[in-house]
Every structure is written in structure tokens, then in C-alpha cells.
Image (cartoon, rainbow, N blue to C red):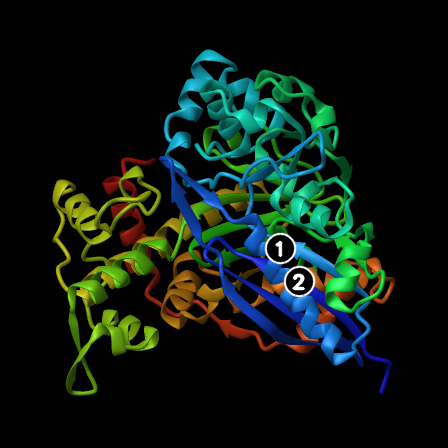
Amino acid sequence: MENKKYYFAVDLGATSGRTILGTLADGKLEQEELTRFPNNLIETGGHFYWDIYALYLEMIKGLQVVGRRGLEINSIGIDTWGVDFVFIGEDDAILRNPMAYRDPHTFAAMDDYLENVQDRKTVYDITGIQFMNFNSLFQLHAMRKAGNAAMQHCKKVLFVPDALSWMLTGEAVCEYTIASTSQMLDPRTGDLSEQLIESVGLKRSHFGRMVQPGTKIGVLTEEVQKMTGLGAVPVIAVAGHDTGAAVAAVPAKDAQFAYLSSGTWSLMGIETKEAIINERSYELNFTNEGGIEGTTRFLKNICGMWLYERCRKEWISRGERLEVRGESMPLSEVSHPELQGSAMQVEAFRSIINPDDKAFANPPSMIEAIQTYCRQTGQAVPETPAEICRCIFDSLALRYRQVFQWLKEFADFDLKVLHVIGGGSLNKYLTQFTADACGVEVLAGPQECTAIGNIMLQAKASGDVADVWAMRAIIANSVEMVPYHPSGDKAAWAAAYKKYLTITNQK
């Protein structure tokens, strides 16, 4: 048995977070969840905030578990959701809890910025980033217009994973993958665009030094060492953006693959050596986010299982019931596979929606939004949970087909396989539909890819893994991938896609 190496990963999502102990030995990776905790939005004064201190405390609790066990961890890495940031004052104190990307102040910010500050084409030509109203650039514009006091008096602006690393080490950095979500990074120069930073009243000096994934930020402060019982453990800038960490964990054999990170959001893309910024990528609103080892994650954000999650929550609150195993059961007691399986009894392609229509961004009722869309497009209106689920799954698969075809157009290599990673990889019906719709082999798994990528990038930083392909070989040796092959009626999927394009008014 080789000497075991231990790595501590902090994996923070928009609803919950975890601390994980990764163990690397004999060419295999094992994970142990140490703690799990909610990441609560705080609504006050007409705004939504993240509790950065609560997240810091949860990191400390996880490190204390390690300290009590007497384990010597090689390093610590943090990944989070994108775009959000923390203001640090002249006295090196946090000025205010960070605003959340779902705050209402973002709703009109993008349109206002693009109309009155900088035109859309210029912003895309600089950044190659998909336009989304909550991108950091537009958040900062909204804050500047509102006279945000924290912004006016800040010394540093740190993206969330960088802010948490700063709280552990006292060192301020700007990690490349998380910075790329801001719509302020120029992938050609590899740094933040001074033109865009200055357009919201800030300077490059407000942000930390740019570092690539795998860079050592610093070590735990004496304060943190005392609280946790640990020594001067290094903190590594892994791929701070959770999708960047997830894509790093795709267990691919070679570069000829596409990926679909499937969860609340679906992110479908490819790894490229250079950013793809041209008229076609602008027209289709593709994004170029920072990857590892100098790569770019060229991808499209798709509204994923958010549709299903919102509907399921509504059904449970309404007390809806479902016939399962010959018995009527409340949906709160019905498993995801049982609910999803009921959709397979419904006629295929009966109702189709565009998952990325603005109507589904955050409606008061997702069920009613889907029904209204179908009604307005002259289709059968889904009524039951099974019918609505089938509508969602069919529509997502058709949207995946569309984006996959676009990716084949952009890629300078053959897309031989589609890796589906994340929680959505467990949905065997949607995964099979994806293989059928795209006409390509799909490999599903791993589910916990973000934490895996975080841990393996730490291992790479410590010299225990040579490069990304060595990382991916270990991951492939450590997880189970489930293969799905196109098995559906090609003609039926082709007809359904034609119907999808007609309904969604696309060519």
C-alpha cells in the first residue's frame, strides 16, 4: 500500500455546502463527506445576501473534524458557484455580506449597462462570455448606480472562493476560472479587462493577483491553526468555479469529448485550447470560461433540472398524489426514479417547450408557466405530474440535441462521446433520451464530480499527479460510469426536433 495522501475539499453550491476528505492511494481516489450544511439566502432590506461568516464557520467545523482525528492533510481547496463577490475594506475587514446573484437588482442591470455604458458586441468581443443578467459586471453596475456604500469604500473585490481562501490565509488572489464567470476577464490576455473594470468605477488594483488553478495561495493563519488544531496547511487555488472543478473531473480518455454537467443548471460544452469568439458564437450566445492547464471551457448554459425541481416542490406543497406500485401515494413519499418512471408511460413529444425561455427563469408557478407556454403554442396542455415530467425531459433532450449540433460545428475535432456528470447523471431516462437525441454514446458519472475535481487539482498541485490526463485516469479507475447508446427511433427524434424548432421559432 502506498502512503495515503489526504486532501480537504470545500464544495459550496447555491443551496448547500459540504466538506470532504479525499484520500489518494494506490492510484485510486476515495471520498468521505465530513460535514454537510445549508447555504441560506438572507432576505433583508429588499435584497438577498449570502452569509459569508456562516460559510467560514462551516469550513472551520470541517477542519476541526480533521484536527480531532489527528490527520495530516496535504492541502485545502475551495470551489463555489460563480459571479458573486465580497468587498474588503481598508482595515482588512469584510464590509458587508455579499449580495446574491438572484437579487432583484440584477433584473434590469444588464440591459441598462448595455444601453448606457458599453455596447453588447464590444463586451462579448472582449470577454466571449454568455450574457446573463446576474454576471458580476452587471451586478457591479447596479451597485454603482445604487450608491452601494460597501463598493464605494472597498479596497479589494474578491470572488467568493477567493474571499474564503483570504479568510483562511490572509492572502488575496483572483483565481482564473472564477474570474472568467464575471464577464470582465479577457481570455486573450488572461487577465481582467481594465476597460470593463473602469466602466463600473473600479480599478484593476481592486482585485487580487491573477492565479491559475493549482497555485498555492498561502497557509492557514495562526488564528485558524489554533481553532482547528492543524498546522500551517497550504491552501490551493483549485478551479474555484464549481463547473471548472467538475469539468476537470470528466473521466475522459482523450480530448475528443463533449461534457454535460447536469444539475439545477445544465452546462454543455467542449474543452478548447483557445477561446472561440466570433460572429457565430456571439449570435448563439456561447460562453468561454477559464479551464485548467490553459484550456477554455466553451459551453452553453441551459436551464436544466431547475424545471423539474420547481414542479416537484409545487406538487408536494399542493398535496399531489401519484399511483405507484398499485397504490396512491403522496408525492412527498415518491422517489425521484418512481416519479420519473411515471413519465415514461406518457406519449412522447406530446408537449414541447424551450427550457431556456424567459418564462421559466423564476416564475411564481413553474407548473402554470409550462402549461401556459404549451397553450400559447397550440399544443396539448400537460396536466398530471407524469405529463409535465415527460414534457420537461423530452424538451431538455431536444435542447441538448440543438446545443450538441452547435458544438460539432465549433469543434475542430470529432465529438466521439458525451460525458454526463453531476446529479442529473442519475436520471436514467433523461440520460437515455440524451443519447437518443444527440445520436452519440453517453457515459454517465461521476455524480460528485465537483468535489473530485477539487481534490485531484490539489493532488496535481502537490506533485502527486502529473497532469490532467493522469488525474482523469485515476478518476476513471475510481468511479463507475454507466454507458448509454442511441436506441430510440431516429426518425421519431428527427420529427420531434423539427417540431421543437417550429414551436420555439428557431431555424
Percent of width and height locating residue 200: 57, 19
State the residue in front, 313 or 298: 313
Question: Can residue 253 be seen in the rendering of this structure?
Answer: no
| Residue under the point 26% across and 48% down | 353
Q: Is residue 10 above or below residue 110?
A: below
Residue labelled with disc 2? 60
Q: Is residue 173 left or right of residue 115?
A: right
The N terminus, quarter of image:
bottom right
Give the Cα separation between the discs numbered 2 and 1. 6 Å
Percent of width and height locating residue 368: 17, 50
Q: What element carries label 2?
A: helix
The C terminus, quarter of image:
top left
Q: Which residue lies furthest to the top in this view?
A: 116
**Residue 502: which quarter of the image?**
top left
The residue carrying pointer 1 sits among few (fewer than 14), some (14 to 19) or many (20 or more) residues within 10 Å by Cα, namely: some
Q: Which amino acid is tagged 2?
A: Ile
Percent of width and height locating residue 26: 80, 81
| Residue under the point 38% across and 44% down | 43
Q: In this view, does 117 lie above or below 44?
A: above
| Residue under the point 26% across and 44% down | 363
State the residue in front, 249 or 205: 205
Count of labels shown? 2
| Residue under the point 58% across and 22% down | 152
Percent of width and height locating residue 271: 64, 48
Q: Is residue 470 left or right of residue 481?
A: right
Do callouts 2 and 1 mark residues in contact (Cβ within 8 Å)?
yes
Q: Which amino acid is tagged 1?
A: Tyr
Residue labelled with disc 1? 56
Q: In this view, does 123 lie to the left or right of 133?
A: right
Q: What element carries label 1?
A: helix
Q: Is residue 24 left or right of residue 290?
A: right
Question: Can residue 353 be seen in the rendering of this structure?
Answer: yes
